[in-house]
Amino acid sequence: MTDKILDTTPEAQPELGRRRFFNTTALVGLTAGLAACGDKSAGTGAAPASAPLAHAGGGANASHLKPGELDSYYGFWSGGHTGDVRVLGIPSGREILRIPCFVPDALVGWGHTNESKKIMGTKADGSLRYTVGDTHHVHLSYKDGNYDGRYAWVNDKINSRVARIRLDYFVCDKITMLPNVQGFHGIFPDKADPVDPKINYTTRVFCGGEFSIPLPNAGVEDEKQYRSLFTCVDAETMDVRWQALIDGNCDLVATSYDGKLAATNQYNTEMGAKFADMMSAERDACVFFNIARIEEAVKAGKFKTIGSSKVPVVDATREANKDAKTALAAYVSVPKNPHGVNASPDGKYFICAGKLSPTATVIELSKVLDYFDGKLEKLDGAIAAEVELGLGPLHTAFDGRGNAYTTLFLDSQVVKWNVDKAIAFHKGDKAAKYVVDRIDVHYQPGHINASQSETKAADGKFLAVGCKFAKDRFLPVGPLHPENEQLIDISGEKMALLGDHPVRGEPHDFVFFKRDLLKPKMVYNLDDFPHAVKDVKDSGVTRNGKKVTVKIASVAPAFGLTEFKVKKGDEVTLILTNLDKVQDLTHGFAIPGHNVNFIVNPQETASVTFTAGDPGVYWCYCTHFCHALHLEMRTRMIVEA
Ligand code: K7E
Ligand code: RUQ
Ligand code: CUA
Ligand code: CA
């Protein structure tokens, strides 16, 4: 069944190939330029593969785990509007954890405890500054070209925040807001220092500003003055180090293994403020930043600041960077509205996916460096290949054997292609068959990643594909569909579909990597919490005017206090420490009528602050099953008049 139809009434259109069917509908309302792309791609590469059956053979990898078996890879998935990061086991696709970052979370009490509110950011009245988020891209810290298990970072597109996750405890520990940026989209940590060879690990995180705005954005409205910034955040302090003013916008971000280059794709070099204007140019760009030069310029004081922000802003616009030998940035041209930019695991290339162009552009990093050194006259000489792949190429992954895998959004396919052969084809060897295989996915794939793909240790075993539409792949549950994260075996020459995994909307990007790269701690350290109630005997109530502090230590199945008294209208801060040392022994704490519910994991301390309500008895109970006497694990808050 090659023509497994996307429409829910397949009988209606049996004669239409799925490619043609979707192309026609998708193109309605899009530009003539895109329609032209469709014509070009028709003769490209291999014919579409027939729809593979789940668990079809071919590769050697299985996705089914027996009960009690552990996954071999950790997967980190951005959560989209839920503002979190999800941890999945691969190949099973099982969701193991959600790590709340930008949006409150009812399970752990994220956004309710004082500690998490401090990380998320509060207004003068103590309430959260924001309660919505939109995470797209999650990436981990590097050492020697592979993940080192220190940190993960994720962006919030809505409010231009970057969150850091500690990978020892799998919790968000810092959030930084980027000044003068709207629509913070692409993010990527660096992998080395551009100057100091001893620093072969992540010390910077690069952030792309997608939406152009007036700078400063203070009520003066002139579309022609809109600009975007590319931002560098310090990986340790999470302070914003510098920003670069650019022409055009930033979409996705990639970094080189030598630390010398970072780049962002630009789909709106036109700097259009309206839909049609953003698609008027035939070519847009991938802008490369010379990190060492930018930081020299900052050191030399060659920057300005914008509005109330103190962050140094260097000038990386085309006009100011015409001389290659001093340029801070260089704009490589890429066809029409590119989207993803991905670094190959051999360190040689960045690959830009064409989106409105059916092509991928392979940019050779050594040539970009030659350009900055004045050794390459025309910057576009760094383009090693520009080859047709199919309709709507968005993101690319790698197997470490020289092959790239690109999602084709409009074709609902993944195309496997050989980078060296694509370069040979581009150079004129028209016999070079660079397309190796195609596979149908279900449906409309966005991001793609292979096991270890974005490291030097790409192992070419599994491919995960984030399908934006699930349509008919799961039991119908009303109008809101899950997304479909599909798993593909790439260990063989041909790709084989292994499974569908529904995920709650809506992840974008993800990475997955060998499980032994992380060594999580299963119990907190009591001493890491300055307010820890270190002994059950230390439980008690202290009053300072209308401010009351209630300290409670807990050991299953009892709280350190059987009751505590406060007065109506008191500002109560309740500090709870879990003194249990056994892994998996979490307690919860809920107070009826007071909007309080949070958990403390073994040896963790957390606190909440609330106003005592009407006089009465309130049973505070443990919400997290901890013991045979979990239901009895209670204390009373007695509110007096
Ligand atoms: Cu392609 Cu935000 Cu990474 Cu979504 S972006 S798919
Ligand atoms: S109770 S143990 Cu409602 Cu069965 Cu939870
Ligand atoms: Cu403590 Cu349930
Ligand atoms: Ca454009």
Image: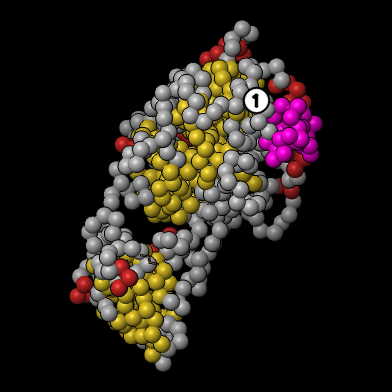
**Residue 554 visible in rendering:** no
Residue projecting furthest to the front: 11
What residue sits 28% from the left and 59% below the top?
585
Q: Is residue 192 left or right of residue 497?
A: left
Residue corresponding to mark 1: 2
Q: Quadrant of ligand 2?
A: bottom left
Magenta span has 22? yes
444 shown above or below 623: above
Amino acid at circle 1? Thr
Height in image: 559 above or below 191? below
User: Foreground: 79 or 423?
Assistant: 79
Q: Is residue 312 above or below residue 447?
A: below
The residue depicted at 24 percent of the width and 67 percent of the height is 555
Can you tell which quarter of the image residue 199 is in? top left
Q: Quadrant of the N terminus?
A: top right
- Tell me where residue 369 appears, x and y as whole percent: 51, 24
Q: Secondary structure at mark 1?
A: loop
- On the image, the x and y values in percent for residue 7 come to 70, 38
Assess whether residue 622 is covered by the magenta stretch.
no
Instruction: Please state if 617 lies on the left or on the right of 447 as rendered.
Output: left
Q: Quadrant of residue 336?
A: top right
Q: In the rendering, at what x and y percent does residue 10 appear?
A: 71, 35
Query: Horizontal placement of 582 versus 382: left or right?
Result: left
Residue 115 appears in the figure: yes
| Whole-percent x, y for residue 246 in the image | 61, 40
Region in magenta? 6-35
Dot 1: within a 10 Å radius of its alpha carbon, few (fewer than 14), some, or many (20 or more) residues?
Answer: few
